[in-house]
Amino acid sequence: MYKNTYRRGPSRPGVQSFSGSNRRNRKNAKQTIDPSRFIKAAAPVSTVGYEPKHNFADFEMHPLLKSNVTNKGYTVPSEIQDKTITLGLAGQNVVGIANTGTGKTAAFALPILNTLMRNPSSQALVIAPTRELAIQIEEQCRILAKNSGLSAAVLIGGMPLGRQKRDLKDGSRLIIGTPGRIKDHLNQHTLDLSHCGMVVLDEVDRMLDMGFINDVRFILEKLPTEHQAFFFSATMSPEINALIDTFSRDAVTVNVKVAETSQNVHQDVVRFSGNVDKIDSLHNVLIQPNVQKTLIFGKTKHGVERLSRELRARGFKSESMHGDKSQGQRKRALDSFRDNQIKVLVATDVAARGIDVKDITHVINYDVPQTYDDYVHRIGRAGRAGQAGYALTFVDKG
């Protein structure tokens, strides 16, 4: 069966605690944001239901893949899957423009797993901006490739390099990781991509926003000239276009993005005066009947930890995610949030970048974000899969 060759373990001295965090070169200067920008009614865009041209059974995939897809309960593909899988199976380079939550992981996973199953000498690389997203991709691939004999190596921060080296030495043909850690292995000659025929860049815009552009270029230059490429992004900038033009030829663009996620989000402010009023105001928000699942953003690791403890003391089922948490702790917190064992997750911006939970009803900016771009990214965690969401930003009356 599919062998999961990544092993979880606590961070240790000398091991990068969050892949790429020391490479981040985006502007960190705090902006002064007019509070009026945090107030906006949702304006969801009406969309016509997409009629797929295929069923999953129609795709020319390995029989085991079809069986696993059926066992997972999938029959009709989403738009990004319907338009991408056929192209991918044909060996075409693909640029997918789509929001998170549209099913894009299966859109690229099925074509690359099909090639890996049919060609024993093939190899695929998947690059993701965060370790949480890398693990989510591995988990989906493991389900889709069940009983295939394929193995995956996950190269992310927060895990010992020695264990990852052993995983690579064991011959894993599916490599999933973050740019910083992949580059580390290339520099140490524990990873060879000279025969890697497939590459996926997931959430390219986020990788560039996090300052990974040079690492990504370094990695792509290690690939053979002839390779199949999948680029997925929610936005397209000149920098992304230049990257695509350099490392893929004749790519077909599949655009299924209808609107910004934030357009589905009702935005408002909560005004407070002093720390006591601030935590009491948060308490009052969280006990409202329509507040079902809440992601709270804080500015610092210590502040996030203190707030989560205070909420638990007040009777809320809460956990925290920040850079001082081990990978195992972060995964357990995220799994508990996704599975509704807890209703409140308190996180820093960096830790929250890999969160993909579709049923978040409320995003709360307990601390005002550094930039307006950070604000838009935060509130995009709500209002997913066509559902309305709510964003509240705490603003000091003073």
Image (spheres, grey):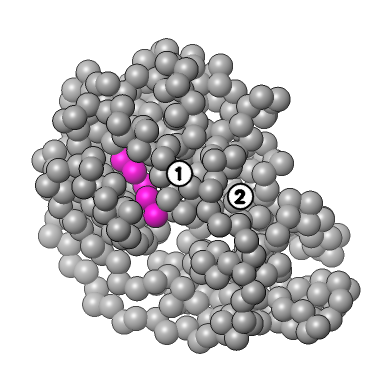
What residue does disc 2 label?
Answer: 351
55 w.r.t. 191: above or below: below
Looking at the image, residue 310 sits to the left or right of residue 256; the answer is right
| Residue 146 in view, yes or no | no
Q: Quadrant of the N terminus?
A: top left
Q: Position of residue 112 (x, y in %)?
A: 25, 35
User: Could you say which is closer to the camera, residue 221 or residue 297?
Assistant: 221
Decide which of tag 1 and tag 2 comes sooner along the chain.
1
- Label 1: which secondary element: loop
Find residue 13 and name its label: none
Q: Quadrant of residue 272?
A: bottom right
279 w.r.t. 43: above or below: above
Magenta residues (range): 200-205
What residue does disc 1 label?
Answer: 212
Q: CA distance from mark 1 to mark 2?
A: 16 Å
Tell me which residue sits at (60%, 86%) in the image.
Answer: 36
217 w.r.t. 356: above or below: above
Looking at the image, residue 311 sits to the left or right of residue 60; the answer is right
Tell me which residue sits at (61%, 50%) in the image.
Answer: 351
Amino acid type at circle 2 is Ala
Q: Position of residue 240 (x, y in %)?
A: 31, 53
Q: Residues within 10 Å of mark 1 (few under 14, many from 20)?
A: many
Is 56 colored magenta in this rendering?
no
